[in-house]
Image: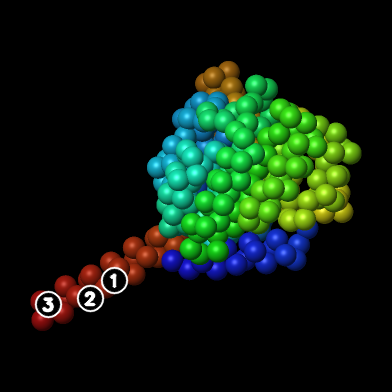
Amino acid sequence: MSTSHIQTLRAMLREEKGVILPGAPNALAARIIADLGFKAVYLTGAGLTNMHLGLPDLGFMDLSQVADHVMAIRCVIDLPLIVDIDTGFGNAVNVTHTVRILEQAGASAIQIEDQHAPKRCGHFDGKELISLEEMVGKVRAAVDTRRQDLVVIARTDACAVEGFEAAIERAGRYIEAGADVTFVEAPESLEDLKAVPRRLMAPQLVNLVLGGKTPIIDEKAAAEMGFSLVLYANAALQGAVHGMLSTLSALKEKGVLDERAVTSFAERQRLVDKPAFDLMGARYAAHAARDNGQRRT
């Protein structure tokens, strides 16, 4: 498998600021993100849990489920793919297995966090952290295990538990352990948000959760602050839910729907690349017909 998507991501982190990173809860969402011209895709753990299992983001996904979705997405897009692995599915030894599996599945980067399992959404209350030393071990395990220059992103949820200064200290230690990018989750003031890229000597990711705890800033402001990646992990999911509620409410109320109320049938087929499969089918049907004709003669 080509690993050019990893080098594309590394170049992006070196050379660009304020890159919008939409989250995808499944392969169709990833196709739409690519179709619209975004530069990278984030496989969201919360979105995957909500969409695939219909459950809240409380640590219900396992490694095999995540790997299946990574493979599905990698089969349909060439963009860099950043994969949320929550707490790494266990201790540092388990992290080594997670990294091997997801590298082979097609991840460009993994993002691991310092919550105690089972984790909670970064914008939920009641989070608990593992020790700094244990998380440093997990980061080192991920860095030591990678074989294809996979990007390692270390997230800390310390803002809500130990305070902003502790979050900066933890992120700094994760950089020392080899993390390529750090992600200080849920700073609650604009002042703290601005301080993150100024105080940490590695590329930074900011997570903008619609309805969450972090102030929402635009792409230009994020770039000026120094953030490399601007994550909207579940904007696509929330938009899809909004569309489903609107469409299905209209169906229930009126008892009938018009195609004008939804994405067209033709557009749905285009987004899943059906014309390419039609051409493929015609090509191989022609080969089969020619081969049958030759056998008869």
| Dot 3 or dot 2, earlier in sequence | 2
- Circle 3 sits on which residue? 295
Residue at 48%, 30% (x, y): give it.
60
Is residue 39 among the parts visible in the rendering? yes
Q: Is residue 10 above or below residue 67?
A: below
- Circle 2 sits on which residue? 290
- Circle 1 sits on which residue? 286
Q: Is residue 31 above or below residue 245?
A: below
Counting from the top left corner in percent of width and height, residue 262 is at 58, 37
Q: Is residue 223 above or below residue 88?
A: below
Q: Find the residue positioned furthest to the top.
A: 253
Spatial distance from mark 2 to mark 1, Cα to Cα? 6 Å
* Image quarter of the C terminus: bottom left
Spatial distance from mark 3 to mark 2, Cα to Cα? 9 Å
Counting from the top left corner in percent of width and height, residue 235 is at 66, 39
Residue 107: which disc?
none
Image side of residue 284 versus residue 9, left or right: left
Q: Nearer the viewer, residue 239 or 161?
A: 161
Q: Residues within 10 Å of mark 2 (few under 14, many from 20)?
A: few
- Can you tell which quarter of the image residue 239 is in? top right
Which structural element holds mark 2? helix
Q: Are marks 2 and 1 in contact (CB under 8 Å)?
A: yes
Residue at 22%, 71% (x, y): give it.
289
Residue at 47%, 38% (x, y): give it.
90
| Dot 1 or dot 3, earlier in sequence | 1
